[in-house]
């Protein structure tokens, strides 16, 4: 990086335990309403044709749910948006089912299981649901996947001078994989990042090339329930940023990234 990366945040989608969408979650993240424990309610992706709706997995449903939330208030239609999909492990349920099939006497894997096993499956379903033909990037950086996706999306906004929809998502692993990867529930977040000149009501984030990567500690959440989610689900490492946006704060935020390395961004309230 040689110059600061800037982007406005024009729309947000959010889905997680006790967090049904951004509008419902916003007062909770701002500390104005209590969080009520509840399993993540992942809706069926109504934007998909019936056949694809039946075949897609939980990771795809989570990603498309937050994408559709963001699109409701987005100034651009989904078919014109470049996208960045990021997840710490893709479709965990599908991974479990494939492992169970390989451990069985039959060892047969259905074509649907196979095509849902690739990390870019949600991106493919996204293009089907919206007709999107713009570039779509898919990446994975284990527990640092949200920060990695945010860095990639910011770089694309700066370099290509066009909006980019960032989608970060994770899902629960069933046992016995849960014993090694104890992600307790599904969580997804969508951020529509835009290079457009700043307008009233639109927050802005900046990544400085000098201070953007740091070995300092990551920010935590003041609310113990949100902090528990942040530590338990990789995509929920986004919560310090989301809490600042919900409160309308202007400050620096440090996000978990790689081992020994964090991502520090500046947030300006809209």
Image (tube, grey):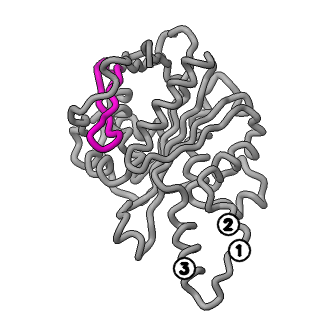
Image quadrant of residue 240? top left
Residues at marks 2 and 1 touching, judged by CB atoms closer than 8 Å: yes
Element at label 2: helix
Element at label 3: helix
Find residue 166 and name its label.
none
The front one of 93 and 210 is 210
Residue 37, image x, y percentages: 33, 56
Q: In the image, which residues are magenta? A: 247-266
**1 above or below 224?**
above
Residue 114, image x, y percentages: 67, 66
Instruction: Tell whether position 252 is magenta.
Output: yes
Element at label 1: loop
**67 above or below 162?**
below
Q: Dot 2: few (<14), some (14–19), or many (≥20) neighbours within 10 Å?
A: few
3D distance between C-alphas at marks 3 and 2: 13 Å
Find residue 114 and name its label.
2
- Mark 3 = which residue? 100
């Amino acid at each position: 990086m040689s110059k600061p990366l800037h982007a406005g945040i024009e729309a947000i989608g959010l889905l997680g335990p006790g967090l049904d969408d951004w509008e419902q979650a916003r007062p909770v993240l701002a500390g104005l309403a209590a969080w009520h424990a509840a399993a993540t309610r992942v809706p069926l992706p109504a934007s998909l044709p019936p056949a694809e709706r039946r075949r897609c997995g939980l990771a795809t449903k989570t990603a498309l749910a937050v994408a559709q939330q963001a699109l409701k208030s987005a100034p651009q239609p989904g078919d014109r948006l470049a996208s960045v999909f990021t997840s710490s492990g893709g479709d965990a349920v599908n991974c479990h089912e494939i492992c169970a099939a390989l451990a069985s006497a039959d060892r047969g894997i259905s074509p649907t299981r196979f095509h849902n096993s690739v990390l870019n499956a949600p991106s493919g379903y996204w293009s089907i649901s919206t007709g999107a033909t713009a570039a779509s990037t898919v990446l994975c950086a284990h527990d640092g996947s949200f920060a990695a996706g945010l860095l990639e999306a910011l770089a694309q906004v700066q370099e290509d001078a066009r909006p980019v929809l960032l989608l970060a998502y994770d899902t629960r692993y069933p046992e016995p994989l849960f014993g090694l990867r104890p992600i307790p529930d599904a969580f997804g977040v969508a951020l529509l990042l835009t290079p457009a000149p700043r307008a009233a009501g639109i927050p802005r984030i900046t990544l400085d090339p000098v201070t953007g990567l740091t070995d300092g500690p990551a920010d935590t959440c003041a609310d113990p329930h949100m902090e528990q989610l942040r530590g338990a689900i990789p995509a929920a490492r986004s919560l310090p940023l989301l809490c600042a946006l919900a409160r309308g704060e202007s400050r620096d935020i440090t996000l978990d990234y790689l081992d020994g390395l964090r991502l520090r961004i500046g947030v300006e309230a809209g």
